[in-house]
Amino acid sequence: MSTPDPERSAARGWVDSHAHLSSLSIDPDVALARARAAGVAAVVCVGTDVASSRAAIDLAARHGDVVASVGLHPHDADRIDDEWAGIVALAATTGVVAVGETGLDFHYRYAPAERQEDAFRRHIGLAKSRGLALVVHSRDAWDDTFRILEDEGPPPRTVLHCFTGGPVEAQRALDLGAWLSFSGIVSFRNAEDVRAAAAHTPLDRMLVETDSPYLAPVPHRGAENEPALVPVVGAALAGAAGHGEAQVAAATATSARTVFAGLATL
Ligand SMILES: [Zn+2]
């Protein structure tokens, strides 16, 4: 009789807390099958507009290990008036566990800052009124992100997805009661600050994500990312945070089930 290896059994339980399955070049069903084979227990499929949010809901309806988040990406905040009624309607659909991704991206500034802020505030209000989690994208916009969250009052379950800050920003997020979701960036050579943030974050406040199809972790950089690689991201996160992989797999899966309430039954 073989002894169960705790690392391996924990590896069967990773939760990818943020993936854009309909943006993959491969069929999402194929990506999900590969993820299951790699030990992924569940995937949060995140919309970036009405069309991709609807696709996320369709996937959640067909797969018991997928839940959906609905929102308009800050890159597209210019379209908020056209998209908003659709997002609000979709937020009431079965399988939806969160609102977003929303937030501020002042790195690219594809939409003017005022439009991004308006869209962000609407998403915060929607998450609160529907009792859903909030998935926040923040890039080169920490002060404004925290200002708006504090001003509106953050939803009780708020996630800073693809966390790119250092320990100072991590502490600001923790002070707000938010969870920090770490992506493959934690494995990048020049991401010392993000690794320091991971080391600063309590185990019960961290999540792990692929942000597929973007940000494939080392040693897969340059390839298309997919949820099957979330154990690789998780291993890098464990290394940065100074915990064992099994511990991080279990803690992040538990947090994902807390934050994304619909996952609780999976
Ligand atoms: Zn994303």
Image (cartoon, helix red, strand yellow):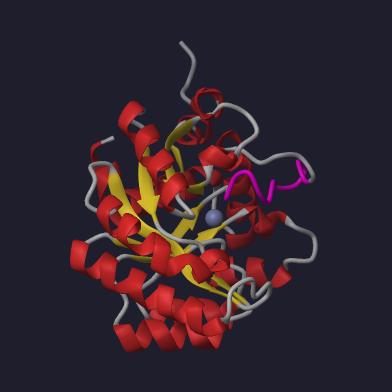
Farthest residue in the top direction?
1
Q: Taking 230 as reference, is 222 left or right? A: right
Position in image of residue 189 (x %, y %): 80, 60
- Of 112 and 175, which appears nearest the observer? 112
Q: Taking 53 as reference, is 127 left or right? A: left
Position in image of residue 252 (x %, y %): 43, 51
| Quadrant of the snapshot with the C terminus | top left
Relative height, residue 186 to residue 64 (above, below): below
Q: Within the displayed image, which quadrant is ligand 1 positioned in?
A: bottom right
Q: Which residues are magenta?
A: 211-221
Which residue is pictured at 62% across the width and 28% down the height?
A: 26
Position in image of residue 17 (x %, y %): 45, 49
Which residue is pictured at 58% across the width and 33% down the height?
A: 228
Which residue is pictured at 37% across the width and 45% down the height?
A: 68
Relative height, residue 142 to residue 178 (above, below): below
- Of 77 and 47, which appears nearest the observer? 77
The answer to whether one can see residue 204 in this image is no
- Of 238 and 140, which appears nearest the observer? 140
The answer to whether one can see residue 72 in this image is yes
Farthest residue in the front direction?
82
Q: Main secondary structure of the magenta part?
A: loop
Tell whether position 236 is magenta.
Answer: no
Which residue is pictured at 54% across the width and 64% down the height?
A: 76
Asked where in the image residue 45 lies, by quadrant, the reply is: top left
Tell whether position 219 is magenta.
Answer: yes
Relative height, residue 72 to residue 260 (above, below): below
Asked where in the image residue 55 lies, by quadrant, the reply is: top left
Position in image of residue 239 (x %, y %): 64, 54
